[in-house]
Image: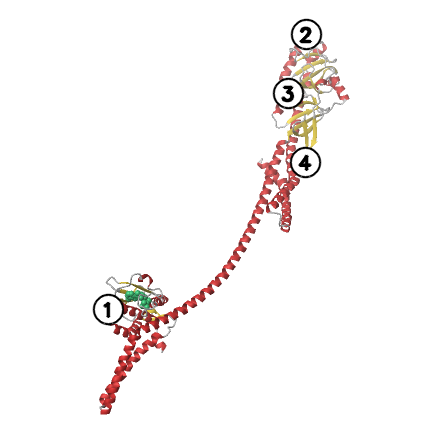
Amino acid sequence: MTALTTRAARHVGFSSACRAVWISGAARTMLSSMASRTPRISARWSLILQMGAFALLMAVLVWPQVQRYFMKEAAEQNRVTARLVGDGLRSALDRYAPLPHLIAARPELVELLRSPDDRDLAAGVNAILLNTAISVTASDVYLMDTAGLTIAASSYRKERSFVGRNFSYRPYFTQGLSGGLGQYFALGTTSGERGYFYAAPVRDGPRIIGVIAVKFTVDAFEARWREASSDIMVTDRAGVVFMASRPEWRLRASVPLTPARRAEIEQNRQYPLDRLTPLSVDRKIGPGGTKLAVIEGAEYLLASSTTSRPAGWTVTSLKRAAPARMQAAVLFAILALLGVLMIVAARFLRQRAAQRERAQKLLERRVEERTAALSHEIAERRRTEETLRRTQAGLVQAGKLSALGQMSAALSHEFNQPLQAVKAYAENAQTFLDRGETGEVRDNIGRISRMADRMAAISKHLRNFARRPGEAIGPISLVSVIDDALAVSAPKVKASGVQLDYSRPEGAPWVMGGHVRLQQVLVNLVSNGIDAAGVQGRLHIAALPAAGGWQVTVRDTGPGLPPGAAEQMFDPFFTTKPMGQGLGLGLSISYNIVRDFGGTLWGANHPDGGAIFGVDLVAADAPERYVSAREAAE
Ligand code: ADP
């Protein structure tokens, strides 16, 4: 079935199916263009219309083709069956044709015909005929005289013996008597069996003195046909069914009998006329010009006939049309299914493509929107950063001014003292000048000059500290920054009475940062340490190598960090100092400065008491030529 289906699909189905699918595709395009013009046609309706168009095209174009193919295929098989059966029947019967001639040549037959009343001779011939019938599997072999009277027969022992019966009415007898080979098909009037008769003349010299007939029954053929897939029907010239695979068709008239034929049958007693009831055979033309027959109103049968000459029989093979139709229906269903699948797949792919396109557009739009939002955000961020930087710079400056403010008391003392000394030395110098003691005058002026140098040094540090620091970060000398920070802090240290010790690092370490800014951080830490340590307190400053860089620590002997300060001390404006003494900006500004250098500022309570603050800095290579911040500023 599968192979057949594939072949059929190749030969007929597919071209039509493809055409149908193509036309359906065209219809689809038409429908979809209609749909685009009339947007109210929903997707579901368009699918229903497409399917409808496809179904119509399949029914009109494909179904007839598929059906025609399978019917023709089955009809061809049936035709072959009819031919084979016809050939088989003819060759089987032809084999028997020479038999009557051979039997007629036996001398006993002539002897009996010469002396028909010789009982012994008749018994001998009867036995011969019986043996012959058995050996050639004939149903009857019998000898008739020229009047058609049977004088010896193989059935001599049977109840319905042919002996004594006259068959002069049978055409085979007359044919035999006239010297030819008699051939005839009839229902035996004595046996009631259908049989095929052969007859040949029995000659006594040139004279025909009798006729020998051989009868074969046809049941064995029919028994074989019943096993075949097709039904077989053999009709004579008049259309009477004398052999059939189905018993109910036998000896029935497949066409109405003409009066002449009826008279002939009656005369030859070929068939009993009362049994020749009509057999309703409705002939039709099926798909592909195939011949169909409906017998007795039953199902459709494919009918193929061959006529065998000279007997004039028609052998008809009748094959059920339903299986061929079923095969056609199955292939049609497969093609229809394929078509539907193709339509559905095409729709699916189209929908997916449309969806993808929509998604793509949506994505593009979102990307555009997001890009616009991002560029807006970036601009906003830049502005914020700029503001932040400005604010931070301002805060740094404010922090420094604050530190200056705090230090102003110590500074005024620091300046006041040398100024008073300068005044005293100047007055002394005048007095010594009046006295003419020039040596003393020079000595006092020298002291005045040293005092002025000291004040100039302090002023220079303060000026540097108050400057707005540059943004640049690069290698700076750690030792020199610490020195400068200590110089700035010196007045406050002195005023506070705090004892400061400094462990100067080995070598000349270089770190990444900005000179003035780091100095500001250290000044701030020293200042906080002094505030915390109080009078009699101690401050220890150290610079040691640490992982990847250097660590500067400022440790005091104060009370340590106030409760809760550890979490907030780097926040701007966090201070625990009394009003007017602390702004709470020192550590937050320092924290950001150190972070800008890639380092870290931290603070904690020391296990031995007091607080310790540390600045971790990244190590740097020494530049080829070092220009200190102070030099650069000058
Ligand atoms: P300010 O010195 O103006 O208060 P800072 O930001 O420098 O601002 O310090 C914030 C706070 O951190 C101080 O008010 C103090 O509570 C705490 N702090 C800073 N340094 C020390 C220290 N060495 N010992 C104890 N507390 C400290």
Q: Are marks 1 and 2 in contact (CB under 8 Å)?
A: no
Q: Tell me the amino acid under the disc marked 3.
A: Asp
Q: Is residue 241 left or right of residue 428?
A: right
Between disc 3 and disc 2, the foreground one is 3
Q: In the rendering, which numbered label is found on residue 150?
A: none
Question: Alpha carbon of mark 1 to alpha carbon of mark 2: how far?
Answer: 173 Å
Label 1 SS: strand
Q: Are marks 1 and 3 in contact (CB under 8 Å)?
A: no
Image coordinates for residue 342, horizontal then vertical, percent: 58, 44
Image coordinates for residue 478, horizontal then vertical, percent: 31, 70
Question: Alpha carbon of mark 3 to alpha carbon of mark 4: how far?
Answer: 35 Å
On whether ligand 1 comes within 8 Å of the CB at mark 3, the answer is no
Question: Alpha carbon of mark 3 to alpha carbon of mark 2: how far?
Answer: 34 Å
Q: Quadrant of the C terminus?
A: bottom left
Which residue position holds label 2? 119
Which residue position holds label 4? 288
Mark 1 or mark 4: whose residue is earlier in sequence:
4
Q: Tell me the amino acid under the disc marked 1.
A: Arg
Image coordinates for residue 415, horizontal then vertical, percent: 29, 79
- Asked whether 234 or 584 is in front, the reply is 584
In the rendered view, tell whether residue 246 sits above or below residue 538: above
On whether ligand 1 comes within 8 Å of the CB at mark 1, the answer is no
Which residue position holds label 3? 219
Q: Tell me the amino acid under the disc marked 2.
A: Arg
